[in-house]
Amino acid sequence: MDFESLIRYKALSQRYTSANSGLVDHFIQQDGEAVEKQLGLKKVQFLVSAPLHKELQDVCGYLGMSQREFLESMLSEALTKAWAIVQAENADPESLGLTGEAH
């Protein structure tokens, strides 16, 4: 591994290890409903095809992260991108003169 890649890996590892999302996963496994209430978490649930689920398991296993952590990160990025597109197309509630929920 070259120097820059090593330093980038160490920096990113430090940055994301500090978040300690594994601790949240641990608490959820112990007593999910109580933790959901204590941490203000809400359940998002949907069915996917078996091959897609297997691929999700494989990539999360390879990356050493939970499916919750992976999907939460993906969902957060997708929502940010969706709102950016909505705003770029002037289709957000403010641009349309509607009083809706703020994003």
Image (cartoon, rainbow, N blue to C red):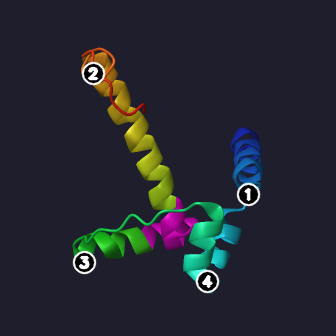
The residues tagged by marks 4 and 2 sit, at their Cα atoms, a distance apart of 41 Å
Marker disc for residue 17: 1
Q: CA distance from mark 3 to mark 4?
A: 27 Å
Residue type, numbered disc 2? Leu
Of callouts 1 and 2, the N-terminal one = 1
Image quarter for residue 59? bottom left
Residue 61, x across and y down, in percent: 52, 73
Magenta range: 58-69
Q: Position of residue 100 (x, y in %)?
A: 33, 30
Instruction: Using the image as rendered, state which of residue 39 and residue 10 is in the foreground.
Output: 39
Q: Circle 1 sits in a helix, a strand or a loop, which is it?
A: helix
Indicate left or right for 52 with 84 as reference.
left
Q: Earlier in the sequence, mark 1 or mark 3?
A: 1
Vertical placement of 87 versus 42: above or below? above
Q: Residues within 10 Å of mark 2 (few under 14, many from 20)?
A: few
Tag 4: amino acid? Asp
Q: Marks 1 and 2, how far apart in space?
A: 41 Å
Quick one: label 4 or label 2, which is nearer the N terminus? Answer: 4
Instruction: Choose the circle earlier in sequence order: 2 or 3.
Output: 3
Label drawn at residue 50: 3
Question: Per the image, is 62 magenta?
Answer: yes
Query: Which label was assigned to residue 98?
Result: 2
